[in-house]
Image (spheres, helix red, strand yellow):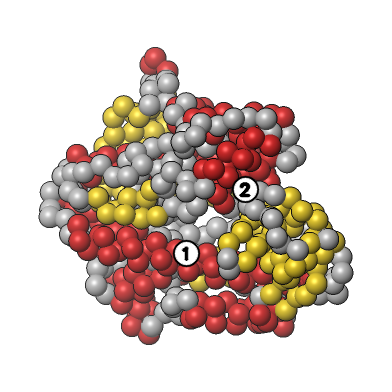
Amino acid sequence: MATDINLNQIAIDAMRKRGLLPAFSPQALQEAEAARASGPERGGEIRDLLGLAWFSIDNDDTRDLDQLSVAQALPGGAARLLVAVADVDCMVRMGDALDAHAAANTTSVYTAAGVFPMLPEVLSTDLTSLHEGQQRLAVVVDMLVQADGTVSEADVYRAAVLNRAKLTYNAVSAWLDGDGPAPAQVASVPGLEEQVRLHDVLAARLRQWRQARGALNVNTVAARPVFRDGQLTDLQPDPRNRAKDLIADLMIAANGATARFLVHKGFPSLRRFLQAPRRWDRIEALAAVHGVTLPAQPDAVALDQFLTARRLADPAGFADLSLAVVKMLGSGEYAAAPAGAAGAGHFGLAVNDYAHSTAPNRRFPDLVTQRLLKAAIAGAEPPYSAEALGEIARHCTLQEDNANKVEREVLKAAGAFLLQGRIGETFDAIVTGAAPKGTFVRISRPLLEGRVVRGFEGLDVGDTARVRLVAVDAAKSLIDFERA
């Protein structure tokens, strides 16, 4: 158990160092308890959609459920797709201590020591979570998806919903791939099998439409801490699968529809964008190694064609290639769009109008967007000015980067603990960072990153190398390699 305590303290210290709040103020906790007692604010028109076959798909251990969905097949290959997003604003008022904490951190922080939620768990994993069997308020994105994957119409409104089945990524993916049995709810919830299979078809159509315009089909792998009897034992890959892709495609469609809705209503908005990669020359060089010549200027369609070809030619090595490309693409950012204006495009997703809106329990930009949507629905004035959104955008971008650094620091501390006693061993690695501040590599067993302190000359992002472990220090989140 000492390992858990140490990791937790490392996480707390790392958050404080980077301007994140590891604990809620007494006032915020009091407000959360008061919200439990008073219940949600229900003003305005709320449609009764309790009778629809809503369901969720998420991780096995997820308790903060932000989205449900349901679909209806229509003549001619079209379909109606509804995505319900938890109404968090109905229990978190602007300007209160709860809102101030969420605005300060801007995101839940997911570390190897545990989760530091953006909102108290009495809300995020209970009252504002779309739990199975619980009636909840939601903001619904209602879309018409054509047979070719275009979203031709969309509306946004408030509704009461009921989650009929909480499904999990791994179980649904195995079932759809024919590698496992159907989840138990498929037999007990009428129409659920048809719903999931229709969702799978719609997701594929939405994905194909975006990929035709250059959406990048990469396959990155995250690390998942494994504990036994309270002790950290491994960092294992947590790869993408069919069900994760399914939900991602639906959420991308919903986020695009919300952005366009706000434009139509003449509202300012908070957008998510990814500019064309600054290191396109390095991506060109990476493609040239595989005999492919990319255009001189950033071209998402050409890049995705190269990635698709490499996925088919070398499935085993595609995750490493994806990681290199993602590192060179850089990180997404938030930006404010003036009233009624389209926002900057997202290079990786191949969409022009994109607003984070589908995870308000976990991300502050989504809560801000939800408030804008509810005001637009009600015919009220925008609750945020374009100038205020600009400040929020800059702060959210900064804090997202800080949260990512905290997560990496705690993960490295966990990795250093696992690598104690393995000094001198060699590993196959891929270069994930090359800058004046240092050269970094990732090994696969256990899945973690470290710094190359000797022999890094000439290494660049995407290169592979053989490295030797020379030092670890869990307390300092230090993992050092030398080139072997």
Which residue is at a point 62% across and 66% down the rendered structure image? Answer: 438
Left or right, 476 with respect to 73, comes to right
Residue type beneath disc 2: Ala
* Residue 304 location (% of width, % of height): 54, 32
Q: Nearer the viewer, mark 1 or mark 2?
A: 2
Helix, strand, or loop for circle 1? helix
Quadrant that contains the N terminus: bottom right
Estimate the spatial distance between the alpha carbons at disc 1 and disc 2, rounded to whole Å.
19 Å
Q: Nearer the viewer, residue 243 or 287?
A: 287
Which residue is pictured at 77% across the width and 70% down the height? 418
| Residue placed under numbered mark 1 in the picture | 401
Disc 1 residue type? Asp
Q: Residue 216 in the image: x percent, y percent?
A: 52, 37
Quarter of the image for residue 308 reads: top right
Q: Earlier in the sequence, mark 1 or mark 2?
A: 2
Q: Where, quadrant-wise, is the C terminus in this rendering? A: bottom right
Hey, which quadrant is residue 9 in on the image?
bottom right
- Please, which residue is most extreme toward the top here? 76
Farthest residue to the bottom: give it: 26
Q: Using the image, tell me which numbered label, if any, was put on residue 67.
A: none
Q: Secondary structure at mark 2?
A: helix
| Residue at 63% across, 41% down | 286
Position above or below: 457 against 346: below
Q: Position of residue 219 (x, y in %)?
A: 62, 42
Question: Which residue bears the numbered disc 2?
Answer: 324
**Residue at image point 31% right, 70% down:** 99
Dot 1 surroundings within 10 Å: few (below 14), some, or many (20 or more)?
some
Q: Would you place residue 299 above or below residue 13 in this image?
A: above
Q: Is residue 131 left or right of residue 224?
A: left
Q: Are marks 1 and 2 in contact (CB under 8 Å)?
A: no
